[in-house]
Amino acid sequence: MSSPTEKALHLLRYLPRVSLNNLSPNPYFKKKTYKVGQYRPREKINKSNRERLRFWPVGYEGGRVPFYLKIPIEEYYKNHKYRRQYPPLTLFQLQLMIDNKAIDPEEPIDLTSLCNTNFYRIDPRFNHFGVHLTDEGCNEFRAKVNIEVQYAREPVIAAIERNGGVITAAYYDINSVIALHRPMDFFQKGEPIPKRMLPTEDAVEYYTDPKNRGYLADPQKVEEERQILAQKYGYKLPDHSRDPIMNIRKDPRQVFFGLEPGWVVNLRDRQILRPTDPDLNQYYRD
């Protein structure tokens, strides 16, 4: 044991380990005490914020109980973070887009057509599942369009059909919405076009109701409801048999007009690649 390192290691082998049992108080530490009635230094006085006229900032939450436990429960807001959101679009804004030639009324209008105008935007990160067409400006709406929305009420449906147009309420899952609202970004990824999923359990009733012009409703019942609504609001329905634009519909599994699920759009070579595997074709068809 010539070196100091070996002496230190030898000493550590035989000395006991440090624990609470073999620790002793510091003999040089002395706690400063004050007698009863003795004046304390100014820095030792512990005054409250209210005594110093310093109040809590706005929004500060004191105590140990969080605010969501103090406030009574509201069932209306239950699972509000997971609800589907439909940003509104008024008929006045739609007419303005058509007048400014941002939308071509001679072509079918869907979510992609509205988002490409840059006047209407959605964000799927915030559970945006499509467009809610509202009745603001229904008296000024004069365009004849074939439009597909995700939610609309009876006055909106009457305003569209009064001018000879067609409206359809269609459901899109979140993956389809991501592909629809920015199609160029989706095509650049080189991914196949997804097939549209069927509505969730709470949305089946709405999209199968002919009064709402649901895309899963019976076409004969939809035509009957169109006649009933025309009698209610006092207008005549035109004949769409000779107008091919008004008869264009998407398949319940289709996302884009003219493109089938499973196809890959090659923007560089301007080609469309179709799957040849029978299993893939069966998957995208079902």
Image (cartoon, helix red, strand yellow):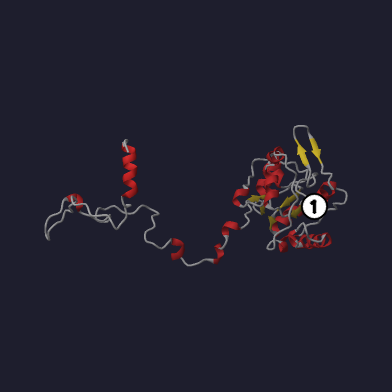
Quarter where residue 8 is shown? top left
- Where residue 190 appears, as percent x and y from the top left, is 72, 39
Q: Where's residue 117, x and y in %?
A: 67, 40
Asked if residue 246 shows in the view, the reply is no
Of 159 and 69, nearer the camera is: 69
Name, please, the residue furthest toward the top: 269
Nearest the eye: 217 or 176:
176
Q: Secondary structure at mark 1?
A: helix
Whether residue 15 is visible to the viewer of this picture, yes or no, is yes
| Residue 184 sits in quarter | top right
Question: In the displayed structure, does residue 63 sit left or right of residue 116?
Answer: left
**To which quarter of the image does residue 106 belong?**
top right
What residue is shown with label 1? 283
Mark 1 surroundings: few (<14), some (14-19) or many (≥20) residues within 10 A:
few
Answer left or right for 147 relative to 125.
right
Residue at 74% of width from left, 49% of height from top?
147
**Which three-letter amino acid code belongs to the residue tagged 1?**
Tyr
Q: Position of residue 201 (x, y in %)?
A: 69, 63
Provide residue 100's location: percent of width, then percent of height: 69, 39
Residue at point 70% right, 58% down?
155
Q: Nearer the viewer, residue 273 or 78?
A: 273
